[in-house]
């Protein structure tokens, strides 16, 4: 297991799904962890804070209070995302889908200046960023924006490192489906993938742990997607 003792981490969107798994792995590795989300939460051995990643004042306050922190992870979905074909899409819904990118940008812009110079940042994109299909244009464009952001900003953030994890279809509370409908959604959604099942939050979070721990990696994205992108 990674040894994060003596490190302080802030995990935004760290209260559910992939972010929660990241929070728990950092905690189990000995880090002091602050998990943020809009709703109240309670996680053993972790400080929970209510913060909206779109609220820049609240974010600035959080980072200032924790000046010198080592790791920033942002897994916050940001808000609702538009789905379906672009030519039928409500353009306000398309625009609102970018809340994820703005939440990420806010956290990096306001967080990085308050971090330790040997600190590291991880953001989560999503496989539609590079798996180009009809019907996923909103999440694909946002995910592509997240990845371009990481590649570009890495040049400016050095020596702070920044990387991304690109998840495939992962079984998390992001999907509200239950029972048979949920099982069918994940089965059908992954049937053509090289590993035909939904991933777990832990399988994806382990990528973030690797990126935080390995001090010779920056400006890149790792795919944890069961082979979704190459199909
Ligand atoms: N699950 C998948 O299949 C999948 C696939 C590709 C990419 N991803 C990406 O992986 C990341 C994590 O997804 P997930 O499946 O773990 O989602 P999730 O289980 O729905 O968790 C989302 C987290 O983000 C927080 N959040 C959402 N909007 C926020 C805001 N405006 N401010 C602060 N916190 C906010 C939520 O807490 P509150 O609601 O309390 O704010 C929650 O902690 C996201 O970037 C997602 O796009 C997921």
Image: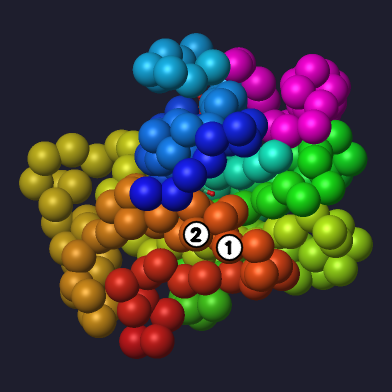
Where disc 1 sits, the SS reads loop
| In this view, 219 is above or below 9 | below
Residue 214, which numbered label?
Answer: 1
Residue 184's spot in the image, x, y percent? 14, 56
> For the point 72% across and 69% down, which residue is it?
219
Labels 2 & 1 near each other (Cβ < 8 A): yes
- Residue that carries the numbered disc 2 in the rendered image: 210
State the count of labels: 2
Side (left or right) of 218 relative to 203:
right
| In this view, 211 is above or below 113 | below
Most extreme residue toward the left is: 180
Residue 208's spot in the image, x, y percent? 51, 54
**Range covered by the magenta-colored residues:** 49-69
Quarter of the image for residue 170 reads: bottom left
| In this view, 136 is above or below 53 | below
> For the point 89% across and 40% down, which residue is it?
113
Would you say residue 210 sits in the magenta stretch? Answer: no
Side (left or right) of 197 relative to 53:
left
> For the point 42% across and 14% down, which residue is it?
42
Residue 131's spot in the image, x, y percent? 48, 78
Q: Residues within 10 Å of mark 2 (few under 14, many from 20)?
A: few
Side (left or right) of 195 relative to 8:
left
Most extreme residue toward the bottom is: 231
Residue 224's spot in the image, x, y percent? 40, 67
Residue 71, which numbered label?
Answer: none
Residue in front for this viewpoint, 58 or 184:
58
Residue in front for this viewpoint, 158 or 54:
158
């Amino acid at each position: 297991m990674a040894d994060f003792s003596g490190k302080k981490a802030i995990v935004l969107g760290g209260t559910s799904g992939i972010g929660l798994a990241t929070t728990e792995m950092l905690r189990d590795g000995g880090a002091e962890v602050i998990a943020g989300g809009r709703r109240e939460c309670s996680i053993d051995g972790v400080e929970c804070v209510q913060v909206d990643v779109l609220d820049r004042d609240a974010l600035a306050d959080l980072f200032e209070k924790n000046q010198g922190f080592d790791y920033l992870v942002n897994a916050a979905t940001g808000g609702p995302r538009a789905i379906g074909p672009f030519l039928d899409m409500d353009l306000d819904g398309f625009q609102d889908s970018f809340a994820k990118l703005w939440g990420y940008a806010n956290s990096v812009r306001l967080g990085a200046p308050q971090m330790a110079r040997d600190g590291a940042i991880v953001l989560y994109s999503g496989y539609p960023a590079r798996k180009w299909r009809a019907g996923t244009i909103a999440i694909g464009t946002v995910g592509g924006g997240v990845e371009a952001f990481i590649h570009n900003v890495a040049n400016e953030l050095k020596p702070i490192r920044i990387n991304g994890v690109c998840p495939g279809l992962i079984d998390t509370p992001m999907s509200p489906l239950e029972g048979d409908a949920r099982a069918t959604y994940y089965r059908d959604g992954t049937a053509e993938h090289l590993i035909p099942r939904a991933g777990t939050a832990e399988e994806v979070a382990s990528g973030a742990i690797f990126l935080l721990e390995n001090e010779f990696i920056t400006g890149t994205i790792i795919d944890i997607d069961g082979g979704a992108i190459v199909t």
